[in-house]
Image: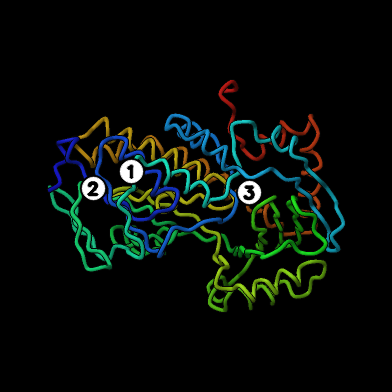
Amino acid sequence: MPNSGSRASRRALVVGAGIAGLAVALRLRTGGWEVLVVERAPARRGGGYLVNFSDLGYDAAERMGLAAAVHAAEPEPVELRYVDRDGRVEATMGVRAQTDLLGERQVSIFRGDLESVLFEALDEPPDVRFGTTVTAIEQDAGGVTATLSDGTRERADLLVGADGLHSRVRSLVFGPEEGFRHDFGTAIAIVPLPEVPSGIDPGTSIALPLVRRGVSVITPPGRQAAAFFIFRTGDAEAELAAGAAATLRHRYGDLGWVVPELLDAAERNEADVYFDQVSQVRADRWSVGRVVPAGDAAWCVSLFAGFGSSLAVGGAEALGDELDRQPGDVPAALEAWERRLRPVAERWGRQGRRLRGVFVAATPLGVRARVLGLRIATHPVGIGLARRFLAVPPTPDQR
């Protein structure tokens, strides 16, 4: 039975085996917790898209002994190119310039690879139930009981909902998703590509920025290429319901260059396409008793902020710290954790809202400004300006 007054007997149920869930599981296991992880997907996922991992996430990874493994999983960096509708290069940023901009203490890593680093860092095979999620949650003074989709009931001292933007845990405990999700009127589709499209050099990242839409293709050496479509929309729900292939064909069918190849790939591999709208999660509180969302389920700062993975890992470490400080009072520890982390999450949430226009320009002038901005950022005098504009976290010697 749960007993929050005893370190040896503390038990946690973590819902979600993504970056946030695995980071929480790892940190809690380090603190002596027994951890059960349930994951809706039938198996661990791989690949995904590249994320920038830095600042408090990188610092936490160092303290957790993960920095070397994170760097080892980083794919070979590639040159960034902005092109026009015909594929003609308009601006470039080489690998060295990207490092100068973002700093040495950051890693561009595929989401699935970061998940693997966290999973493999667990000192013994974790208790993970795939194809399982939570269907009901009850609390009392002594603990929390979750009913799972496999028909079992699990008792714990703490339940962490690390189940993403569309969190089931958050809906069960805090209320319907619509009360917390704030949409940006923008949709994104990520299409895995079986081969590098003709007309694109392998080992590059190509971006075609357009008015109210854009498309990018990344072809990292030794890894699967992928196309990224992003566009503004006045009716995201209808376009999501229509499906990725049909929506992308409608939105991008007028373009030439390599875009027809990308659209064909979306149709052939539609089951593997990630298609959703860009949103944030904003909640007035992050815990109710012994139940707490974490990662995107609590504070999704959006794709535009580019800081979700760092917040997930840094937040997991901070959660473990507060639970260690107050082992006999889980609710108080969760409140302390929120006070510690909320200012950081809110700051990056504001950054996400500010950068929407950079990712998806509303006017031709905005498109030109984006291209010009990349050119400026490649020069020494422009790097400082770009770092401030993008809110790149300072390095330890700059703090």
At label 2, counting other C-alpha atoms closer than 10 Å, the crowd grade (few under 14, some 14-19, many 20 or more) is many
Please tell me in which quadrant of the rendered image residue 54 appears. Answer: top right
Q: Secondary structure at mark 2?
A: loop
Tag of residue 355:
3
CA gap, disc 3 to disc 1?
A: 41 Å
In the shown orientation, is residue 323 left or right of residue 16? left
Q: Nearer the viewer, mark 1 or mark 2?
A: 1
Q: Nearer the viewer, residue 54 or 220?
A: 220
Instruction: Report the residue at 72% width, 45% height from top.
Output: 78
In the shown orientation, is residue 213 left or right of residue 175? right
The quarter of the rendered structure image containing the C terminus is: top right
Q: Which residue is mark 2?
A: 290
Please tell me in which quadrant of the rendered image residue 4 appears. Answer: top left
Q: Nearer the viewer, mark 3 or mark 1?
A: 1
Instruction: Report the residue at 56% width, 68% height from top.
Output: 272
Q: Is residue 294 above or below residue 165?
A: above
In the shown orientation, is residue 99 left or right of residue 182? right
Q: Is residue 267 above or below residue 288?
A: below
* Nearest to N terminus: mark 2 or mark 3: 2
* Nearest to N terminus: mark 1 or mark 2: 1
Q: Which residue is mark 1?
A: 124
At label 1, counting other C-alpha atoms closer than 10 Å, the crowd grade (few under 14, some 14-19, many 20 or more) is few
The image position of residue 70, as x and y in percent, is 53, 39
CA gap, disc 1 to disc 2?
A: 26 Å
The image position of residue 187, as x and y in percent, is 59, 64
The image position of residue 147, as x and y in percent, is 22, 63
Instruction: Report the residue at 33% width, 36% height from top.
Output: 320
* Nearest to N terminus: mark 3 or mark 1: 1
CA gap, disc 2 to disc 3?
A: 35 Å
Q: Secondary structure at mark 3?
A: loop
**Amino acid beneath label 2:** Arg
